[in-house]
Amino acid sequence: MGGRRFRGLALVVGLVAALAVGGCGADADSGNDSAEPAADRGAAREQPAEGGADGDQAAPGGTGGADLRVDQRSIIYTGTMQVRVDDVEAAAREAVTAVTAAGGFVGGDRRTSRSAEARATLTLRVPADKFAGVIDQLAGLGRQERREIRTEDVTEQVVDLDSRIATQRARVESARKLLAQASSVDELVRLENEVGTRQADLAALEARKRRLADLTSLSTITVTLLGPDASTAEEEADLGFLSGLDGGWTAFRASARIALTVLGAVLPFAVVIGVPLWLLLLWRRRRRARRTPPPGLGAMPPVPAGPAGGPVSAPPPVPAARSGP
């Protein structure tokens, strides 16, 4: 009995020792595992310190490399100004010289030479980066009376056009490859039409891209040079009877033009549809008039039937009464 108790106690002590040894091993392994990530984290913290400049350049805003600087955007600049000068012709020559020196050109030139009432309207195209400088030069030609500058950001349109052009070029190339592999006349004709349609769409997209590139690369300035005594549009528009009469006459002519336009558009339909309809109504009216008897001729009354079903005989005439002798 004592031997059995001793064996049981020895077994329990052995199990406890085994569990203790396993726990120590697990602790050692977990310590090693936790040490390695700590070392990795330390190395990861040290890495940005070594290449901090690169990290700062790649970080801004998380835009994935998109350049959103102002000088990289596509912006259309449009300016309108009015300047009063002593000599319109000399000021116009100076304006043309300034624009040409900036790398631009004259897109339009309209002048009225009437001594002190002279007037010149110039449409100038200048590079976008020289826009502000040319505006200041034109303002210095005399006394600036009005200035208006408008901007339009078309960056998204340009990016969208670039993407669509790339996609359309890929479609054209794929259609050309299929055209080269055509095995029948019908398939050849169909693929030629498809290639032509895709090329036309690509040409339209490229034309829009060139138009936007022209508007963004060359800004437009419309400058009006006025002589010393030239009147402005605001000064010429007086609020009198003649002004009201002129405005009313202009509105009447515009309304008459619109009415004639509508009449001209409706007239073909009226001729094609209205004339046959009118003839049909006229024919039906005449036909109805033929079927209706004249108002003086009524229907004859029916003859009464006799006892045997025959007509009733007329009563004998009553002799006239004789007069006295």
Image (cartoon, rainbow, N blue to C red):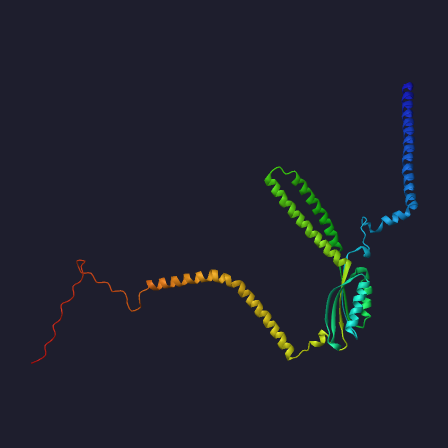
- Which one is in front, 232 or 105? 105
Across and down, in percent, residue 210 comes to 73, 54
Residue 77 seen in the current view: no
Residue visible at 71% across and 46% down? 169
Q: Answer left or right for 266 relative to 301.
A: right
- Which one is in front, 29 or 107? 107
Q: Quadrant of residue 315?
A: bottom left
Across and down, in percent, residue 68 comes to 81, 54
Q: Is residue 5 above or below residue 287?
A: above
Q: Quadrant of residue 228?
A: bottom right
Q: Answer left or right for 6 relative to 225.
A: right
Q: Answer left or right for 262 relative to 52.
A: left
Across and down, in percent, residue 7 comes to 90, 20
Q: Answer left or right for 229 relative to 41.
A: left
Across and down, in percent, residue 10 comes to 92, 23
Residue 218 seen in the current view: yes
- Which one is in front, 241 or 198? 198
Q: Quadrant of residue 181?
A: top right
